[in-house]
Amino acid sequence: MIRIEQVNKKFRRLQVLENISARFDQGQVIALIGPNGSGKTTLIKSILGMVRPDSGKIFVREQQVNGDPAYRKDIGYMPQIGRYPDNMKVGQLFRMMTKIRNASSTGLDEDLYRQFDIPSITEKPMRTLSGGTRQKVSAALAFLFNPPILILDEPTAGLDPLSSEILKEKIITEKKKNKLILITSHVLSDLEELTTHIMYLQEGKMQFLKDLQTLQEETGELKLGKAIARVMQGYDTNNEWIDQIFAVEKNNETPAK
């Protein structure tokens, strides 16, 4: 459903993406992970057409990303930080997006719209919303049009524990519908129950793209964080992010006193 061919991107002298090639298929849940600045968000924005690569090609459902935004109707996107017109009311935002998508109300997926109680805030201007409530709005919009592809950038960031669980359950539901889902997250424990494949980026390079079972078998580690750290030790023994993973896993294994 998404094909990436030798994509490169620089911002001035900084090589943000270097010769990235990958294929993401229907029914997969791909976790895009790596340290800050590894190129995850740039790759996502390149798929969405928000960033234009310097070279290489990207295809979404066999349509090349080349400036025509029509293909985006098949994608539900939840940004890490949703930016909306400050004076626009929540209800206006949903009506506007429904009109832009030319969507029928009978075909909408309102699960998160209802579970996050969006109807109770439709008259509130976007500028008055907390960060967590903005995340709920972004999530409800991403899933609203029942797209075959979902791209979720740090989806649980800023959400309270209950809302985070609601969102994860929704992702699992969509996974069972054989959709393609791309997720970035620094919370590796969130990814274990959601993903089928792990794509690891570091300094703009794809270090590996493996299915979760293969990764666990090759490393002998059932915990996702430890499995990734084991693989990456073979690439870079001085990676501070790997050290942090081991520290977190060790703390999680410490018995409560």
Image: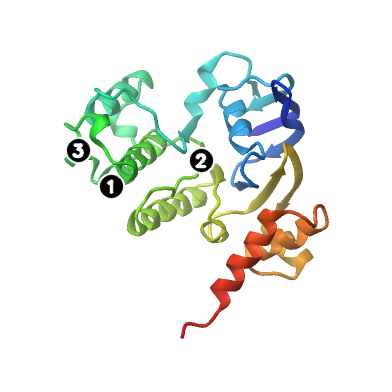
Residue at left offset 50%, top offset 29%: 74
Image coordinates of residue 55 in percent, x first then y, are 75, 20
Image coordinates of residue 119 in percent, x first then y, are 20, 39
Residue at left offset 51%, top offset 58%: 190
The residue furthest bottom is: 257
Q: Around disc 3, counting alpha carbons within 10 Å, would you say few (fewer than 14), some (14 to 19), or many (20 or more)?
A: some
Amino acid beneath label 1: Phe
Image coordinates of residue 92 in percent, x first then y, are 24, 24
Q: Helix or strand or loop: what does disc 1 sit on?
A: loop
Amino acid beneath label 3: Ile
Residue at left offset 75%, top offset 70%: 220
Amino acid beneath label 2: Asp
Q: Is residue 112 left or right of residue 234?
A: left
Of marks 1 and 3, which one's residue comes earlier in the chain?
Answer: 1
- Residue carrying label 2: 153
Is residue 28 visible in this depiction of the protein?
no
Residue 195's disc is none
Image coordinates of residue 21 in percent, x first then y, are 76, 34
Indicate whether 100 appears above or below 80. above
- Residue carrying label 3: 121
Marks 1,3: beta carbons within 8 A: no
